[in-house]
Image (cartoon, rainbow, N blue to C red):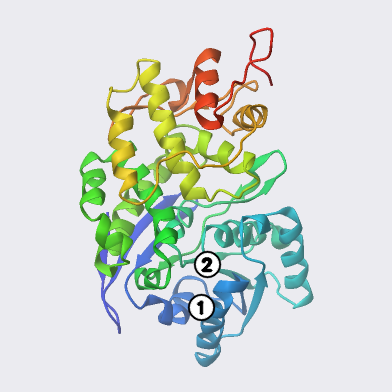
């Protein structure tokens, strides 16, 4: 449960996330970005700090974090990489690792990830593997990172075979989220993270799902109070799941609702389709799949479509997809068993269908229909079987 902290500045809300090795707080509050040195000294004291940002966020916030650390008497260096999903790669992981080594960062150092979901995943993976692991602090600056990506300890990179297939669990010492910074994002970028908020409501909290729809205008406008409320509730919900299942061996799979199809859309598009857009379409399609197989309450996909449309999301992206590629990426999803995709299905808004392992295998002809909805083409060969 969140609690309110008081310090020298404005109030700070804290949501604890418990792990097998202890716990860490997710701190949220307007103006927290300027107070990063205070939280570093309290939660992650170090000899040196390696601040990692993409080249856009570095100019907006990363340099300010380094300057604030220097002013506070902390030694910090800025490391950057090219913005975009394409940089979430083993090549950039290697380049950043080498840069930290050349700069003399050692085991008494701490990585500070300042940026969106790509930065959190990539910098977190650098920290997880650098000198066999050094601490990381997550400082999310996008809605998707604040609401979802920075919480739970997942780190990693994409590979040719699919998204997030190489990585490690590496929990942060602290997450520091400043909802005021989302005002600098264009509305379409805010929407990317709000797709994950809708997902949290869809799988765990129907009232929150409705609240997001009612607050859509304020959220899309970057209203700080509305964003703070969404960040706190999403983090509370995700923290509850992550605390119960840190390593995704059971109930944590429900956080992948929409992601089996969403990740396939991202990968098959060559990552030209952004994460939130792909996951939003994935949620609608997986809800339709659940309705087709008789698991999901009829009308659920329509409610999801209506809610996501408030954020300009939910439709299958108008991109040319190859049916065989979509099938291939469905088969390498982390929930897949023996090459057969599995899906998190809803019973209704706010309730997940509790299948074996919290995900369900569906019949091949249902997958054929699903792929046809994504691609507009058939995935069947001339002999009538599904191609792989």
The residue closer to the viewer here, 198 or 203, is: 198
Residue 39, given in percent of the width and then of the height, sits at 43, 75
- Label 1: state its secondary structure: helix
Residue 116 appears in the figure: yes
Estimate the spatial distance between the alpha carbons at disc 1 and disc 2, rounded to whole Å: 8 Å
Q: Using residue 170 as the reference point, say whether residue 218 is left or right of it.
A: left
- Above or below for 318 versus 107: above
Toward which corner of the image does residue 10 lie, by quadrant?
bottom left
Residue drawn at x 62%, y 55% as measured from the top left: 85
- Above or below for 249 versus 214: above
Numbered circle sitting on residue 61: 1
Tags 1 and 2 touching, CB below 8 Å: yes
Numbered circle sitting on residue 115: 2
The residue closer to the viewer here, 379 or 340, is: 379
Give the mark nearest the N terminus, 1 or 2: 1
Residue drawn at x 60%, y 23% as measured from the top left: 337
Toward which corner of the image does residue 264 lie, by quadrant?
top right
Q: Using residue 337 as the reference point, say whether residue 106 is left or right of it.
A: right
Q: Using residue 7 as the reference point, say whether residue 379 is left or right of it.
A: right
Residue 361, given in percent of the width and then of the height, sits at 50, 19
Residue 299, given in percent of the width and then of the height, sits at 27, 27
Residue drawn at x 37%, y 66% as measured from the top left: 27
Residue 351 appears in the figure: no
């Amino acid at each position: 449960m969140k609690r309110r902290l008081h310090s020298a500045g404005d109030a700070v809300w804290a949501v604890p996330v418990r792990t097998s090795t202890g716990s860490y707080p997710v701190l949220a509050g307007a103006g927290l970005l300027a107070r990063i040195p205070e939280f570093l000294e309290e939660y992650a004291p170090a000899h040196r700090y390696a601040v990692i940002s993409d080249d856009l966020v570095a100019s907006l916030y990363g340099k300010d974090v380094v300057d604030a650390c220097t002013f506070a008497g902390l030694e910090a260096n800025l490391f950057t990489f090219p913005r975009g999903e394409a940089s979430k790669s083993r090549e950039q992981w290697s380049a950043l690792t080498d840069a930290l080594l050349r700069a003399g960062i050692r085991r008494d150092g701490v990585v500070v990830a300042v940026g969106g979901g790509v930065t959190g995943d990539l910098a977190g993976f650098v920290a997880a593997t650098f000198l066999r692991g050094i601490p990381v602090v997550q400082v999310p600056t996008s809605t998707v990172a604040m609401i979802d990506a920075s919480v739970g300890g997942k780190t990693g990179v994409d590979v040719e075979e699919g998204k997030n297939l190489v990585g490690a669990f590496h929990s942060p010492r602290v997450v520091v989220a400043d909802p005021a910074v989302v005002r600098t994002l264009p509305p379409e970028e805010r929407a990317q993270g709000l797709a994950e908020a809708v997902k949290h409501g869809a799988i765990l909290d129907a009232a929150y799902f409705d609240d997001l729809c009612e607050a859509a205008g304020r959220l899309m406008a970057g209203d700080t109070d509305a964003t703070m409320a969404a960040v706190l509730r999403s983090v509370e919900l995700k923290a509850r799941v992550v605390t119960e299942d840190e390593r995704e061996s059971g109930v944590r799979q429900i956080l992948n609702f929409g992601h089996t199809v969403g990740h396939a859309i991202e990968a098959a598009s060559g990552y030209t389709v952004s994460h939130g857009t792909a996951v939003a379409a994935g949620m609608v399609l997986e809800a339709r799949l659940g309705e087709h197989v008789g698991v999901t309450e009829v009308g659920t996909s329509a409610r999801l479509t209506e809610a996501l449309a408030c954020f300009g999301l939910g439709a299958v992206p108008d991109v040319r997809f190859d049916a065989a590629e979509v099938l291939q990426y469905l088969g390498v999803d982390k929930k897949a068993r023996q090459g057969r995709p599995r899906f998190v299905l809803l019973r209704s808004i706010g309730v997940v269908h509790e299948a074996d392992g919290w995900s369900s295998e569906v019949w091949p002809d249902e997958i054929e229909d699903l792929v046809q909805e994504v691609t507009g083409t058939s995935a069947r060969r001339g002999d009538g079987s599904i191609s792989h």
